[in-house]
Image: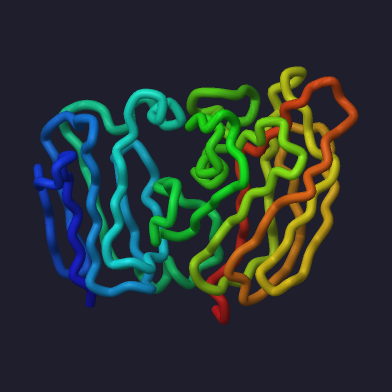
Amino acid sequence: MSEVSIAVRDMMGSAKAEATGSRQAVLVFEQEYQPGDTINISVSDINKHYVIRIDDTMDEALVYLTKPYILYVIPFEEKRISYNPKSFTGNRHYLTIREAEDFEIKGYRNLAKNVMDQHGDPGCYPHVFANVETRGEAVFAARNAIDGVIANASHGAWPYESWGINMQDDAEVTLAFGRPVDFDRIVLYTRADFPHDNWWVKATFTFSDGTTEVVEMEKSDKAHVFQIERKNITWMKLGSLIKADDPSPFPALSQIAVFGTESGQ
């Protein structure tokens, strides 16, 4: 049974509010967030699944924590526009953390989704990182590809945030699971803001077991669904992205979903 806590701290590390509990903690923070504020999550047991609500406008995140302390930086200014404009605003915030239930852990689900993913090495999985993000802007960050938002008819501010490749031919994005998983279906939503956008006609998935899978795509705003089965995979990469013969230089990825279970379930 894990001891868990969730706290809001200022830029100096002083606690503004904190809640601690056995297996579960609930925090109501009744102030406006200020620049430099962070949400601090602590757990006594690591390498374990937890369900975290980082903001009451966002879905709960079923995540796998490999570190006992997770620091979530409240986004402000440019960093905020890839989130719902209501997120992290106002003077009353509802934050929760709890141990995940067995039925949640063992169920068939989207293993890629993590609405609270961040840059760096957060110790919170699933996690994505890329070798390029257009101009370093939040609306084109890799994390946008696993936030669960599939709107792809435009580009820019939420809900049209995406992973942008800055016209780089060798662009690739890596999805790390933090532990072994099994899956049988991968779904890509490519951005479809035509004619602004280009699209990919071919791409390659590379998996942690050393295998690869080449897939073909077409100009579409619909989901690209691939029946690809792998077991005991800890990470996967999407790369070797081949653009269509189109004047636009701007293909992008709105969302990736990977459906499966924990390994051995």
- Outermost residue toward the bottom? 264
Left or right of 231 in this view: 224: right
Q: Position of residue 244 (x, y in %)?
A: 86, 33
| Residue drawn 63% across the image and 34% down it | 164
Say which quadrant the N terminus sits in: bottom left
| Residue drawn 68% across the image and 48% down it | 172
Q: Nearer the viewer, residue 181 or 104?
A: 181
Q: Is residue 156 above or below residue 58?
A: above
Residue 28 shows in this picture = no
Q: Position of residue 48 (x, y in %)?
A: 37, 72
Left or right of 135 in this view: 195: right
Residue 189 shows in this picture = yes
Q: Position of residue 202 (x, y in %)?
A: 84, 46
| Residue drawn 39% across the image and 45% down it | 59
Report how many numbered discs are placed on residues in the image: 0
Q: Is residue 224 above or below residue 250?
A: below
Dividing the picture into quadrants, the one containing residue 233 is bottom right
